[in-house]
Image (cartoon, rainbow, N blue to C red):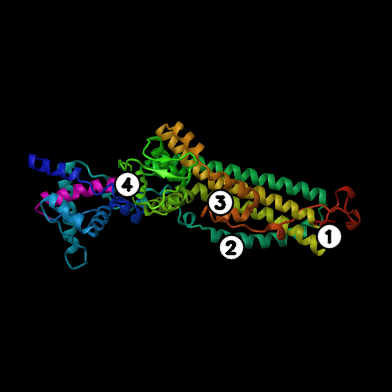
Amino acid sequence: MNLEEGTLWKKIEEYQFDSPEEDYCFSTKLADEQQWTEQFTADAILEYKKFMFLATVSNQMVSPSATIDKVWHQHLTFSDAYEEFCTVLGKKIKHMPATGKPGQQTSLKAASDQTAVLYKRYFKEQVAEIWNNKSFEELISLDEGTPNWMTKINDLDLTLAALVMLFLLVVLWKELLVSIDNPNFLWMLTGTAALIIGIIVWACSIAEKETVNKVLENKYLVRLSKEEQIVMMVKSDAMLLNAIHELIESNRLKIDENGREVHIDEFKLSDNKYENLIVNHFKTASLSVFSANYRVLIGKPMLLALKRLEEKLSQVILNTVEYTQAKLLCFTGVTLLYSLLIARGYLGITRGKPIAKLIMFALFISVVLGFLLRYFWFQKRRNIYRKVVANSYNTTGFLDKLAHRDKISYPEVFTSLVIGSGLGALLYGNDKRNNSTHHDDSSTGCSSSCSSCSSCSSCSSCSSCGGCGGD
C-alpha cells in the first residue's frame, strides 16, 4: 500500500456510518433487518469498507461476498450517506446486480478471484466468516451436522405425538390399574412422579452444561455486547433499566426523591448508543414523569430490535441436540404421568367412587411440574449466558449488581408456581415469557383416596380407601 492508498484507507476506516443523534442508525437498522449481533455487524461493515477500498483502487471489477452485498444494499438505501461515502472514496462505485445473463457467471467468478488477490495484497487473509458466503445463521449454529429430524422437531409435533401416546397409555393403564389397590397406587404414582422430576432435572442440567460449552466455542455467540448479554441473561426491560442506572451513576440523569420526575441538566452524547437513545428522548420529551417516558422508551425500534435478536438467539440455544433430547424426555415423562392420573380418574368416575383427593393430588403435581419445567426451560436457558459471561469476561461483580437490580423475573417464577401446568409450561413457557398458556389439569389428572370407607367395599384397608378406581 503506497502513501496515497494508505491515506485513502485511513479516511475510509475512520468514516462513521452512524450519528449519535440517530435512534435507528445505519448499523442498528442493518443488524435488525438481518438479525445480526452487534459484533458481526461491526465486522461486516469493516469488511465492506475494505471491499469499497479495493473497488476504488482497482481498475478491474471486484465482487463482494453475500454478507458484504447485504451491507452494500443497505447502504444504497441511505442515498445521501452513500453519496457522501463515495465522495470520500473519490469515485462513484456502482452496484451491478446478478441478472443471470449469458456469460455473467464467468465474469463474476473472475471478479471474485481478482478480489481475493487484491485483498491479500492489501489486507492479508480474508476474514472467513464474512467472505466464505455462509449465512449468519450457519455461523451461530451450535449443531453443525446434526440430523435434520432432530433440528426440525417443534412443539406442535411433540404435542400431537404426546396426545396419541396419552390415549394409548390410558387404554393400557385402565386394564392394569383395576387390580391395584389405592395405597399401592399412591406409592406407585409418587415414585413415578419423583422419577420423572429427577429425569427432568438431570436432562435439563446436562443440556445446559453442554450448551454452555458450545456457546463458549462459537465466535459470535460468545462475543455479544454488554447490552445483548443483559437481554440474554434477563430481558430487554432490564437492559433499559441498566442503561438508565448508568446515566444516573454518571450524574447525566437525575430522578427526584420520589422516583417520579426525571431531569437531564446536560444533553451530552457518548459512544453508547443506548444511553444516547435515552438522552435524545428526553431532549424532546413533553413530560418528565419517569413511568410515562419509560413506556415510550421500551417501544423504541432500537430496543425492539434487541428483543427480536434475543428471541432468535434463544431459539438457537433451544434447538441444540441436547435441549431437543431433554424436551423429548420431558414430554415422554409428563405424558406417562398424566396417563396414569387420567386412567385412574376414569376408573374412579365410571365406578362411582369419589375422586376429590385424586384431583387435589393431580393439581399438586401440575404445580410442581409447571414450576420445574418453567424454571429449567426459561431460567436455566438464561443461566447459560450468565455462565458464558462469567467464563469469558470475569465480570462476577457486574452480574451480581445486575441480579440485584432485576425486579422482573421473580414474579414470573411465583406465577408459574401458582398457576403452572406441567404440559402447558413445557409447550409454551419457552416461547413468550409474558404469554404463558395454562391448562386446567383438574379434569384430566387424578390420584387419590376416599374419605368414606363404605364407598369402597373392596379396598384392602379402610384407612387408605379412596375412589381411584382400584379394587
The residue identified by callout 3 is 327
Mark 4 or 3 closer to N-term?
A: 4
Name the side, left or right, on which 436 lies relative to 264: right
The residue identified by callout 1 is 353
Residue at 71% in and 50% down: 364
Q: Secondary structure at mark 1?
A: loop
Mark 1 or 3 closer to N-term?
A: 3
Q: Given the image, on which type of amino acid does mark 3 rest?
A: Lys
Q: Nearer the viewer, residue 419 or 441?
A: 419
Badge 4: residue crowd in 10 Å (few <14, some 14–19, many ≥20): many
Q: Mark 2 and 3 residues: CB-CB less than 8 Å, in contact?
A: no
Q: Of the numbered discs in the image, which one, if any, rests on residue 160? A: 2
The residue identified by callout 4 is 40
Q: Given the image, on which type of amino acid does mark 4 rest?
A: Phe
Residue 100: image location, x then y, percent: 22, 67
Badge 1: residue crowd in 10 Å (few <14, some 14–19, many ≥20): many
Which region is colored magenta?
Answer: 42-60
Q: Rounded to the nearest whole Å, what is the CA distance between mark 2 and mark 1?
A: 31 Å
Badge 2: residue crowd in 10 Å (few <14, some 14–19, many ≥20): few
